[in-house]
Image (cartoon, rainbow, N blue to C red):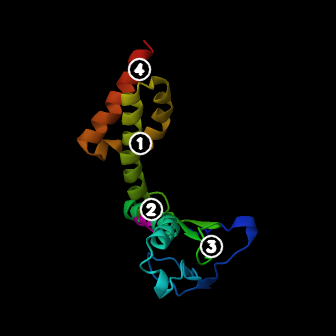
Amino acid sequence: MKVLPMSPNGVTHVPEQNMDEKEGMPNWLLKLPIGQPIVRIPITDSEDDDRCEQIKGILEPYLRLDQENAVLARLGLGYFEWPLIMRSGRLPQEIGIGLVCGLPDSPQFEQQRTALCKIIASILKSYHFGGSKEQIPAWAEVLKQLPLKQANPLLQKAVQDALDFAAAGNS
C-alpha cells in the first residue's frame, strides 16, 4: 500500500519514481529534495556568541524533526515529516507529512501495534496518576485491538491498574 506525502495547498515538491519489483519492498521511491542550506555562516560570524545563539535557534526545529522521525521509525510507527521548502536562515514553514503502513498481519503492522501498547500504557498511567478517571474508559475499545497479552507484564499491569482505577470511580 502506498501513501504519498501530504503537501500543503496540493503543491507537490516530491517527485515519485517507479522501481523494479522486489519481494517485501515497495516498488516506488520518493525523492525528497535536500533544498537550500539551513543557515549560511560567514567565517566572521563563527565566533560571534549572539549570532551563534541565533543559528542554534534556527537549527533546533530542523534537528527536532530529524530526531522525531528517527524515534518514530525505530518504533515502526511509519510517520515522518520534513520541511518541503528550505529557506536559508529561516525556520521551517511548510511541513510535508508521510505515512508508511503495512497490511494487517504484516510484520510492520504488528510492530506498530506493539509500539501502541507502550504508548497507550503510558497515556493510561498518566491519566491514572493525574486522577483523570473519566478519560480512561474510552481507551478500552482501542485496547481490544492491541497485542496487550504479549506485552511486557509491567505494561499489562499499568493498563489494568488504570482500568481498575477508572472502574472504582464508577461503582
* One can see residue 144 in this view: no
Q: Residue type at mark 1?
A: Ile
- Residues in magenta, as a range: 66-70
> Cα distance, mark 4 to mark 3?
46 Å
Q: Nearer the viewer, residue 150 or 133?
A: 133
> Cα distance, mark 2 to mark 3?
16 Å
Q: Are marks 4 and 2 in contact (CB under 8 Å)?
A: no
**What is the number of the mark on residue 84?**
3
User: Residue at left 52%, top 87%?
Assistant: 20
Q: Earlier in the sequence, mark 1 or mark 3?
A: 3
The x and y percentages for residue 86 are 61, 76
**What is the number of the mark on residue 68?**
2
User: Residue at left 43%, top 39%?
Assistant: 143
Query: What quarter of the picture does the N terminus occupy?
Result: bottom right
What is the secondary structure assignment of the residue under circle 4?
helix
Q: Residue type at mark 3?
A: Leu
